Amino acid sequence: MKQTLAIALVLLCASRVFGGSPDGVSTQDVSFTAQCDGTEQKYVLLFPASFASVEPHDVLIALHGYGADRWQFVKAERDECRAARDFAAEYKMLYVSPDYRASTSWMGPKAEADVAQIITDLKRTYRVSRVFLCGSSMGGASSLAFAVLQPELIDGVASMNGMANFLEYENFQDAIRESFGGSKADSPLEYKKRSAEFWLEKLTMPVGLAVSGQDTLVPPQSVLRLAEALKASGGNVLLIYRENRGHTTQYADAKTILEFMLDSARPKTAN
């Protein structure tokens, strides 16, 4: 069963039917030395058309799904990936797609450290106004995890077909155990602190959520509960729930939650 799930998710999320970047967008494949362990890590950086380094720009970081890598959100024709690229290009954002450690990463400690380092490095190099985070599937779960782990670094988050509770999630446990440095039984606090459902008070930024009722790979229940709890506590959240869809987010829904995230964020600054 685990092998079947893994194969299905790899085929679905890492499909390499590649397209191009939006017109005028230039691409840079960036290598950096991870501060947490000295290894070489990578991310792709897309510059908007007519990029001017003297002007402030927002950043959109897109986290890939299981079985993929940094190129998924740059080249894949999946609706979630196209929507994120088009959104970043429309608003002239710096668009960043990191490996965040592995094709099977679920935002463990080293992945978290890498993404935080990328944000810090971008702010040192460019005039960054705001930083937004999105992802699909594993990337959707990881974007919510990073938002509660490092809320001071994120101005908005959009999660597509992700989940918000690692303690109850049962799929891909071998990969999550490797990423988190132990099993649920070994490290329950590690799993809890990466589960957005338990940390509503840290989700002070706008949160866009899109999930599907027929999704068995990354079931929607924890995100549905998260959305309900955020609404009840006065959080800034938009939920799109497609009861009859499977493990996908359609283009229009992805754009809608990305637009909500941006429109509801703090005003852009001229850093």
Image (tube, helix red, strand yellow):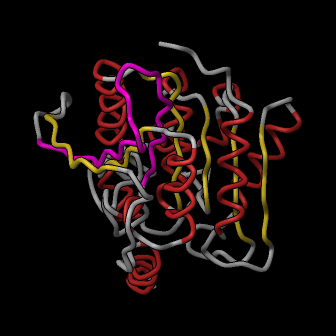
Q: Viewer-proximal residue, 214 or 261?
A: 261
Q: Is residue 168 above or below residue 148?
A: below
Q: Viewer-proximal residue, 35 or 88?
A: 88
Task: Tell me the residue at 39%/60% (across/down).
Answer: 21
On the rendered structure, is 216 left or right of 71?
right
Q: Position of residue 5 (x, y in %)?
A: 46, 81
In the picture as drawn, the residue positioned furthest to the top comes out as 271
Q: Position of residue 66 (x, y in %)?
A: 40, 66
Q: Position of residue 4 (x, y in %)?
A: 43, 86
Q: Position of residue 228 (x, y in %)?
A: 84, 46
In the picture as drawn, the residue positioned furthest to the right comes out as 232
Q: Is residue 172 above or below residue 48?
A: below
Task: Tell me the residue at 61%/34% (across/down).
Answer: 156
Residue 31 figure quarter: top left
Q: Viewer-proximal residue, 111 or 15?
A: 15
Q: Viewer-proximal residue, 65 or 47?
A: 47
Residue 269 figure quarter: top right
On the rendered structure, is 92 left or right of 168?
left
Residue 18 figure quarter: bottom left
The secondary structure making up most of the magenta span is strand
On the rendered structure, is 207 left or right of 12?
right
On the rendered structure, is 139 left or right of 253?
left
Q: Is residue 42 magenta?
A: yes
Task: Tell me the residue at 71%/62% (across/down).
Answer: 253
Q: Which residues are magenta?
A: 40-63
